[in-house]
Image (tube, rainbow, N blue to C red):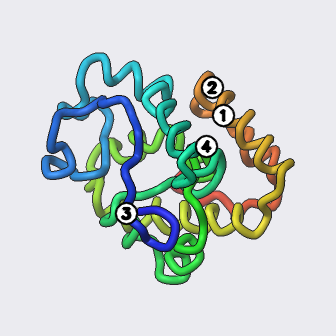
Amino acid sequence: MGYKNKRFNIFKFATMLKNSPNMGTGSLTTRGDPRVLPFGRFLRKTKINELPQIFNVMNGSMSMVGPRPQMEDDFYRYPQHVQEKIYDSVPGITGIGSVIFRDEEEYLSAPGVDPIAFYTEKIAPYKGEVELWYLANKSLWVDIKLIVLTAWVIIVPRSQAPFRWFKNLPPKPEWMD
């Protein structure tokens, strides 16, 4: 879902089996997810699969930095007040939610965790709050820092740099430690 909840086609290299959103955990991907193609694991880990989104930036459906576009089901997992604000923003190739949840699969794959329930009850509310933080604090300087941090967390996935670089982020929940 994009600006004003408009559906749009997002350009990406295919990394999963065809029809994956209708299998397993739907739009959520867990560690070792059998729907991910062998070479797709490499593309996803390095985020190379996201590079074609530069065409989305060129056609105006996305920006370089902003809240990540969500599949419809995932968008509606955000609390209502978050949905209302994100609705008014152009989605980005990267953003604070992408940087903080660089390794989201790790949380969704923890032993005994129901991935859909965990995403809905824990990840979506906090991710929504950090996306609102971005919308309230966006500037050229914040965008530059987020682009640099995006490259950094690809190299150092468990980095705490976002919390050091942006001291006024919403407090990190205990389950993230």
The residue sitting at 30% across, 17% down in the picture is: 39
Q: Nearer the viewer, residue 111 or 154?
A: 154
x, y (%) of residue 76?
37, 72
Q: Amino acid at mark 3?
A: Arg
Q: Amino acid at mark 4?
A: Val
**Image quarter of residue 144:** top right
Q: Nearer the viewer, residue 164 or 97?
A: 97
The alpha-carbon separation of the residues under discs 1 and 4 comes to 9 Å
- Dot 4, how many residues are within 10 Å of its Cα: few (below 14), some (14-19), or many (20+)? many
Up-down relation of residue 78 to residue 90 (above or below): below
The residue sitting at 71% across, 38% down in the picture is: 147
x, y (%) of residue 119?
38, 59
User: Secondary structure beneath disc 4?
Assistant: helix
Mark found first going from the N terminus, 1 or 3:
3
Q: Nearer the viewer, mark 1 or mark 4?
A: 4
Q: Which residue is mark 2?
A: 156
User: Secondary structure beneath disc 1?
Assistant: loop
Q: Nearer the viewer, mark 3 or mark 4?
A: 3
Q: Amino acid at mark 2?
A: Val
Q: Which residue is mark 4?
A: 99
User: Secondary structure beneath disc 2?
Assistant: loop
- Dot 2, how many residues are within 10 Å of its Cα: few (below 14), some (14-19), or many (20+)? few
x, y (%) of residue 161?
74, 38
- Dot 3, how many residues are within 10 Å of its Cα: few (below 14), some (14-19), or many (20+)? some
Q: Which residue is mark 3?
A: 7
Mark found first going from the N terminus, 2 or 3:
3
The residue sitting at 30% across, 29% down in the picture is: 15
- Dot 1, how many residues are within 10 Å of its Cα: few (below 14), some (14-19), or many (20+)? some
| Residue 25 seen by the camera | yes
